[in-house]
Amino acid sequence: MSLKNDSFPSSTAFDAINSSLQSDDAERKDAVKKGNAIFAFTLKNKEGQEESWHIDLKDKGCVGRGPAPEGKKADVTLSLSDEEFAKLVAGKTQAQRLFMSGKLKIKGDVMKATKMEPVLKKAQTAKPKL
């Protein structure tokens, strides 16, 4: 099942991250060990629509739609525009820079949010078309 939403062009990155996590069992276990959290992403597109995805690095090491896996709660929620998320996963900007400029809002455990960048780099190695 594709995680892509045509209204959110950067959402292809979630498919890339998921396939990267699923392709290598050792890599997935390492990501879960390092991440140890459920990360939620709420993106807002140019039309003002919002959509959420999550990356479960607490239990399964997978990506899905919605703010968290069913029956669970995200440890940290990152809210930003679809355009800024595209730049972030492409490596054209840093999360810290987006946060400092007010373009990235973080709810929950801010320290866990710092563990997200290596996972986003997995989208770069998978080369999503953004």
Image (cartoon, grey):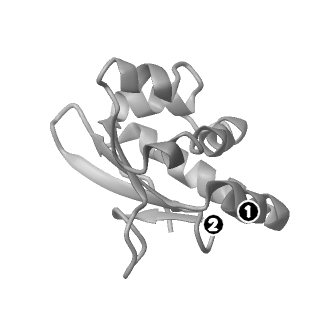
What is the three-letter code of the residue carrying label 1? Arg
* Figure quadrant of residue 35: bottom right
> How many other residues sit within 10 Å of disc 2, few (<14), some (14-19) or many (≥20)?
many
Q: Is residue 96 above or below residue 89?
A: above
The picture places residue 37, in percent across and down from the top left corner, at: 53, 61
> How many other residues sit within 10 Å of disc 1, few (<14), some (14-19) or many (≥20)?
some
Of marks 2 and 1, which one's residue comes earlier in the chain? 1
Residue found at the far bottom of this picture: 71
Left or right of 117, for residue 107: left
What is the three-letter code of the residue carrying label 2? Gly
The picture places residue 94, in percent across and down from the top left corner, at: 52, 23
Q: Secondary structure at mark 2?
A: loop
* Figure quadrant of residue 10: top left
Who's the residue at 55% across and 33% down the image?
Answer: 89
Instruction: Determine if residue 10 is in view.
Output: yes
Left or right of 16, for residue 39: left
Disc ID at residue 61: 2
Who's the residue at 34% across and 35% down the image?
Answer: 82
Residue found at the far left of this picture: 48
CB-based contact (under 8 Å), mark 2 and mark 1: yes
User: Where is mark 1, residue-wise?
Assistant: 28
Who's the residue at 51% across and 20% down the image?
Answer: 93
Left or right of 49, for residue 84: right
Q: CA distance from mark 2 to mark 1?
A: 6 Å
Q: Secondary structure at mark 1?
A: helix
Q: Is residue 40 above or below residue 13?
A: below
Who's the residue at 61% across and 51% down the image?
Answer: 17
Disc ID at residue 92: none
The picture places residue 84, in percent across and down from the top left corner, at: 39, 27
* Figure quadrant of residue 40: bottom left
Q: Is residue 60 above or below residue 124?
A: below
Instruction: Determine if residue 7 is in view.
Output: no
